[in-house]
Image: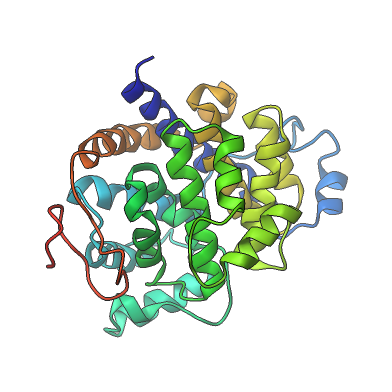
Amino acid sequence: MNGLDACHDRILGALLGLAIGDALGGPIENMTAAEIVARFPDGVADDPQFEPGEVTDDTEMARLVALSLVDRGRLDMEDIARRLVQWAEEDTARPGPSTSRGIQALRRGVPWRQAGSIAEPSSGALPRCAPLGLVIPEPNIVAATVACCLPTHRHSLAIAAAVAQNLLLCRLVAGVLWSEAMASLESGVYDLEGAETIRAALTAGTGASGAVAVLAEAVACVAQAPTAGAALVSAVALGGDTDTRGAAAGVLAGTRWGAAAFPLEWETRCSASADMRSVADGLARLYHDLRDETSLVDRQAPDERLVDRAGRPH
């Protein structure tokens, strides 16, 4: 497998993993770990009573961002903000509290840079921002991720968690080993409010709450599991925010091990799998294109302006 094919496989694995993890966690969201064991004593992946398949808002918003990247050929936050508002108007849309508040602000005409909630470090930005980590070049990934969070999540810890996730994804897609990607992140490679809290949580394998806890637990599951499937089962078995943690573990596991790492039955039963395969093709092409381009986002002021593919303000 040549370098580009390997990147394509990791991008496909990431998107499939995100959707499959979301679908595994969706039916048991907000259940405790003890309740999950009591209801599914054979484990969620093997119990005949367990019926995953439908994805949640986590996959839908990740797809939304991925399609914007493919269609626009760059990070266009005005386009993403419009798509968020349009998506929320669909009958099937079920955004979480922070995302709902942000979208309501966008509807009122609040600029996307100021629309996001600062009330709590909720986890909804993690899966939504993940497609950026799969294609944006590393010199731009911090600024791009910050910008993508702002329409719905402006709490510093929610942003820092999404940045940490995307730094990992960026390196894994490029072929960096898991241990090396983790070591560089834990040793401190980005200067952002909340970064120390994230590093401490990654070291401990858990965090206080919200995005910090979801990311740290997802990372721990992927780090400790022997396979991608085992990582997802461990992630959703923890209870609580199972869909978002499953999606976060899935995107990391898929990027680490590739698309073939997930059981074929899981992919077949996941309602978004075919769609994610199509989206992955577009992202893989964009990954290659952007390696020959200059800055997409001004690293010095990601919350003030965007730049086009040639680095010019617009």
Say which residue appears at 44% left-offset and 50% top-offset.
130
Using the image as rendered, state which of residue 256 and residue 230 is in the foreground.
Answer: 256
Q: Position of residue 271 (x, y in %)?
A: 48, 38
Answer above or below: position of 217 versus 88. Answer: above
Q: In the rendered view, does 110 fall on the left or right side of 308?
A: right
Q: How is the image coloured?
A: rainbow
Quadrant of the rendering where the N terminus is positioned = top left
Q: Residue 160 or 184: which is nearer the viewer?
A: 184
Q: Quadrant of the C terminus?
A: bottom left
Residue appearing at x 51%, y 46% in the figure: 168
- Regarding residue 277, the answer to whether it shows in the image is yes
How many numbered circles are shown?
0
Where residue 96 appears, x then y in whole percent?
A: 53, 68
| Residue in the image at 70% along x and 45% along y | 220
Residue 50 shows in this picture: no
Query: At which x and y percent is residue 110?
Result: 30, 84
Residue at (18% x, 51% y) in the render: 72
The residue most toward the top is 1
Task: Look at the picture and state if 210 lies above or below 310.
Answer: below
Using the image as rendered, state which of residue 27 and residue 212 is in the foreground: 212
Across and down, in percent, residue 212 comes to: 63, 63
Horizontal side of residue 237 vs 312, given as left or right? right
- Between 118 and 34, the one nearer to me in the picture: 118
